[in-house]
Image: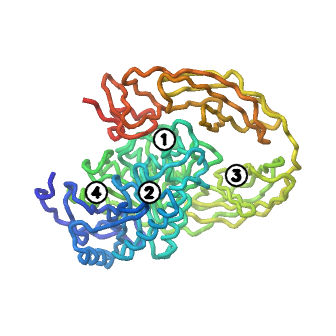
Amino acid sequence: MPAAIIAPATVPVASAAPAGGYKIVGYWHNFDNGSGFIRLRDVSPDFDVINVSFAEPSGAAGNIAFTPYNYSEADFKADVAYLKSKGKKVIISIGGANGQVQLTTIAARDAFVSSMKGIIEKYGFDGLDVDFEGHSLYLNKGDSDFRNPTTPVIVNLIDALKSINGYFGTDKFTLTMAPETFFVQLGYQFYGGSCISCDSRAGAYLPVIHATRDILDWLQVQNYNSGPITGLDDQYHTMGSADFHVAMADMVLTGFPVAKNANQFFPALRQEQVLLGLPANNNAGGGFTPVAEVQKALDALIKGQQLASYKTRGSATGYPNLGGLMTWSINWDKYNNFEFSSKHRAYLNAIVPPVPDTQAPGAPAGLLSTAKTATTVSLAWGASTDNVGVTGYTVKYGSVSKDVTGTSTQITGLAPDTNYTFTVVAKDAAGNVSPASGAVTVRTNAASGDVSPPTAPGNLTVTAKTSTSVSLGWSASTDNVGVTGYTVAFGSSTSSVTDTTVTIGGLTPGTAYTFSVTAVDAAGNRSAASFVSVTTNPPSGAQPWAAGIAYKTGDEVTYGGKTYTCRQPHTSLQGWEPPNVPALWLLKA
């Protein structure tokens, strides 16, 4: 609907968030898409933070530009200052659906930093919001550890955000992020740098969030325009319901093993660092959630009134310090007569803000070594106690830290015949850290000199195939020091897996491939290879849609007697059938 025929709405009278209370963040359009233009000074007072959207790439790689829409520069600056005088934060958001930002080089990183400093200083913004979408972030093959990323677009963004934050000062600067579920929660099931057939963007925000968690003010994942996502209950959750919002928030409030690898655990964020991202109405995005359903989710998350369909894992009594709500957008909220901001502001203001918890957990007791080899040490300790609940532990030795959720762990990659001194601290749901446990010093065993390779994987067979994928299975290898994983190779492509099955996608229809599988043991010895040859199925027009396939833009599939065209690259999941995710599939006329 054109902006000219939208009836003006009256800004409601309301109070902002109480001191220490719950925030409502809204995106303000620096463009007109039919939702109507609003001057910044006329934004509903129910919003505590206004994200000006968007600053976008312009010119040289990494350079970001911003020009106020339908404003003189002086008037825009005056309105920013006016909102700040009312106690609001005004933040510049970068990217959006049309603003692809890829910092592939050091020069691009430096241009990004320089241009963002200039924009923030010029207009007086309180900080920046990272809303990178599309193909801005991805993981290179083999970049499998979110704690130590190597992909340039990831590493350079982390460096840039730390540089900008350091320039303005953490106490004065607000840093937020608004990724899609694909880039965060999907990382529980798939991680782009460590799996063969999944989209390289899966979970790609996780290393950025983790590296900046100490300076990140809040994370507002977009719980909309999303396919079904697997929660910590290993069930699919579908957008638009209280169940979805609770499950998605619980994942980042509890933490989770990335790609279900227990050695790659993404630690929980602090409660106040987590906001729910929601569309303001049906026009704003897929997955609109009615007010009553949103507040049912908030009852579960803030008040601990558990849903029948999903129970929070991180805290059975809820997260009383949850950060609040974000919406796309302020403009669509006004278009919808302020339903989102007014009703949720009233709900949140009625909750008495909890007293911040500053009580640290007790120190872990009884730290001891339970086993050791030349390169590993196994540790165990007694659980800490805390008034709001312990969320995890950090094992420290030298300059190394390892986050774990249980009361035992194995430290790997150590040097033979070397002394290591270990301590453990506990962390609670409010982010408090305990005193350190008593230290324990362990000397690793002398090198065994093991040179015996594992046995070759047995019975390597093709268990399934399509025109673009092949599934393999084999019998486990045996070894005197233990098999740690397998390497699957074909042509110039290799991938490491820990299981005895794998599905390889992205293959060419009607093409012969030879796959090899080798086993690797704890001493680094590699077995002889097992081989199997197979020809993918020939193409025959649109293929039936299936889960676990890496689809490319333009691929055609059939489903339910209809033909669909792929709109953007992705790896299909059960529940993401073409009729369910119009953002991914277009019905062919």
Which secondary structure lies at badge 4?
A: helix
Q: Earlier in the sequence, mark 4 or mark 1?
A: 1
Q: Residue under circle 4?
A: 340
Question: Of residues 38 and 288, which is closer to you in this image?
Answer: 38
Q: Earlier in the sequence, mark 1 or mark 3?
A: 1
Q: Residue under circle 1?
A: 199
Q: Where does the image place residue 490, in percent across and percent down from the top left?
A: 61, 31
Q: Earlier in the sequence, mark 3 or mark 4?
A: 4
Q: Residue under circle 3?
A: 407
Residue type at the position of mark 4: Phe
> For the residues carrying marks 4 and 1, which lies nearer the camera in this image?
1
Label 3, label 2: how far apart the Cα atoms are: 28 Å
Task: Tell me what residue is drawn at x 28 percent, y 30 percent.
Answer: 588
Tell me whether circle 4 and circle 1 mark residues in contact (CB < 8 Å). no
> For the residues carrying marks 3 and 2, which lies nearer the camera in this image?
3
Q: Residue under circle 2?
A: 302
Which secondary structure lies at badge 1?
A: loop
Identify whether 288 is placed above or below 178: above
